[in-house]
Amino acid sequence: MSTYPTPQRQLRGHMPSRPTSRLASTGEHQAWLARRLTARDRWLARMLYEHRVLTTHQIAELAWPTVRAANHRLLDLYGWRVIDRFQPFVTTGSAPMHYVLDVAGAVQLAHEDGLDPKSLGYRHQAALGIAHSLQLAHTVGTNGFFTSLVAGSCGPMRGLTTWWSERRCATYFGDVVRPDGYGRWTEAGAVLEFFLEHDCGTETLDRLTDKVRRYAGLATRTGISTPVLFNFPGSRREANARQAFAALADVASVPVITTNAKFPSSVAAQRWLPVVSTRSGRLRIGELALLLPCQASETAADSSTRLSPPAPLPPESPGLS
């Protein structure tokens, strides 16, 4: 028996063997995937197409009981070219793995919807390009807000039922407002529809107040006063913004509710404070649903907006007229 230690290179985990982009898009590979992809795998691919990038923790909040369980399946999907991944550089510690849609996942989505894969508008280089985008932290933060709401959901009677991405919101509202996301929370029979503004502290207060004016203009044009939730990075930033919002006449026509990231609890917890309210203290998002209920009924026409599963983004959808 050899007394020499095992070389370090033999102790390392092997990277999964992955097919090339050309092979991953072939009918043979798609047929091979057909008996391996679960409904959850397909749903995850659709979520990555809609929301561009999700971290391991966010994916676990969406669809797995633990991060460990998610990692086991994500490794398979990565090896099959359904998803791809990257890890951003950070100065201390290590960033979580970030996942995007890969070639085989995009082709599978197109076939699932009866589309030619070329009409989907997917390009692998563009999907991975978000790794170098200056908007990466903002996109991940926005997505983390919604996955936290999903984690705080308690069945069909209480929870997030709809989540639109920034891109989808721009398709329908971009000529008036550009929200970072749109959501619908249901609790005790009440429905709260809201726009999200995820603030990273980089915009001026004048820019924030202009956003509120635009949301007020949207409410005037549509006759629907949809609440706007502002998620600020810290309590001082939130206090300064609230002071600026309170001085606006438009704040009376559109509900503006704020919170900040310093709260250790979930974004669904008691941390929301309306700028104008007859009640004192912070509220749960479910209490906002009871305070500001939406009377709009959910019809077959808007069933495609539901969180499970969301529909693919329309190639060309009309903006608000």
Image: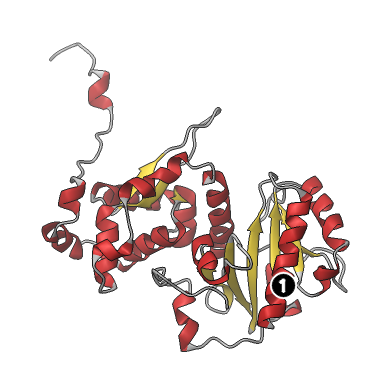
Q: Quadrant of the N terminus?
A: top left
Residue 217 or 259: which is nearer the viewer? 217
- Say whether residue 35 is visible: no
Query: Residue at the location (71% across, 61% down)?
Result: 211
Q: How many marks?
A: 1
24 horizontally vs 185: left or right: left
315 horizontally vs 173: left or right: left
Q: Which residue type carries mark 1?
A: Gly
The correct choice, above or below, for 65 with respect to 126 in the image is: below
The spot of residue 194 in percent (x, y) is 64, 70
The spot of residue 218 in percent (x, y) is 68, 73
Residue 39 or 312: which is nearer the viewer? 312
The correct choice, above or below, for 318 with respect to 242 in the image is: below
189 horizontally vs 119: left or right: right
Q: Which residue is mark 1?
A: 217
280 horizontally vs 168: left or right: right
The spot of residue 55 in percent (x, y) is 46, 48
Query: Residue at the location (71% across, 66% down)?
Result: 214
The spot of residue 312 in percent (x, y) is 39, 69
- Say whether residue 100 is visible: yes
Crowd band around label 1 with a 10 angstrom C-alpha radius: few (<14), some (14–19), many (20+): some
| Label 1 element class | helix
Q: Quadrant of the C terminus?
A: bottom right
Furthest residue in direction top, as rendered: 3
The correct choice, above or below, for 268 with respect to 293 in the image is: above
Query: Residue at the location (78% across, 51% down)?
Result: 205
